[in-house]
Image (spheres, grey):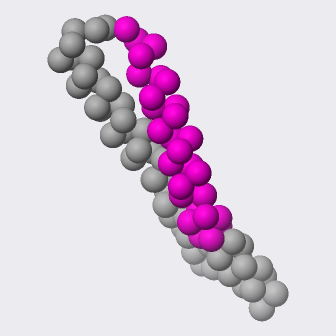
């Protein structure tokens, strides 16, 4: 492997990390915005109120996206092993 291939693998790994983390992070963002909006409308300023719905939503999102995340990671690993074997 030369330097260009290593940089290409690093770029793919970073992009894969972004793809894997995007689903649960977007769900957490949306739930956080909704809870914050409800807090603003009802004038309840409890800081801990945001955490329980956000944790539950992220947990459910992880359960939902886990097969996709595993498939992406498995595909990347197989490609990486094939590249190593071809060298």
Rendered residue at 32%/26% (across/down): 35
- Image position, residue 87 (x, y; %): 78, 88
Query: Vertical placement of 74 versus 37: above or below?
Result: below
Q: Residue at x 36, y 31 (%)?
A: 32
Q: Quadrant of residue 25?
A: top left
Please tell me whether residue 24 is drawn above or below residue 68 in the rendered image.
Answer: above
Instruction: Report whether residue 39 is seen.
Output: yes
Q: Is residue 60 magenta?
A: yes
Residue depicted at x 65% and y 76%: 75
Furthest toward the bottom, the residue is: 86
Image position of 75 (left or right of 58): right
Task: Residue 13: tell me if it is visible.
Answer: no
Residue depicted at 18% across the width and 17% down the height: 41
- Compared to 42, does 2 lie above or below? below
Give the answer, above or below, for where 61 lies relative to 12.
Answer: above
Closer-to-camera residue (73/63): 63
Q: Magenta region, mostly helix, strand or loop?
A: helix
Closer to the camera in the image, 47 or 52:
52
Q: Which residues are magenta?
A: 46-73
Q: Which residue is at the far left?
A: 41
x and y percent of residue 70 in the render?
Answer: 65, 64
Q: In which quadrant will I find the N terminus? A: bottom right
All told, the count of numbered labels is: 0
Residue 56 sits inside the magenta stretch: yes
Q: Residue furthest right?
A: 85
Q: Nearer the viewer, residue 3 or 50?
A: 50
Left or right of 46 on screen, residue 75: right
Residue 23, x across and y down, in percent: 46, 53
Splitting the image into 4 quarters, where does residue 54 fall?
top left
């Amino acid at each position: 492997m030369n330097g260009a291939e290593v940089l290409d693998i690093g770029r793919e790994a970073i992009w894969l990390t972004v793809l894997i983390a995007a689903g649960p992070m977007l769900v957490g963002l949306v739930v956080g915005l909704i809870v914050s909006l409800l807090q603003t409308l009802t004038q309840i300023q409890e800081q801990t109120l945001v955490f329980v719905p956000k944790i539950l939503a992220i947990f459910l999102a992880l359960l939902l996206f886990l097969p996709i995340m595993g498939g992406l990671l498995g595909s990347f690993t197989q490609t990486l092993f094939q590249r190593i074997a071809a060298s």
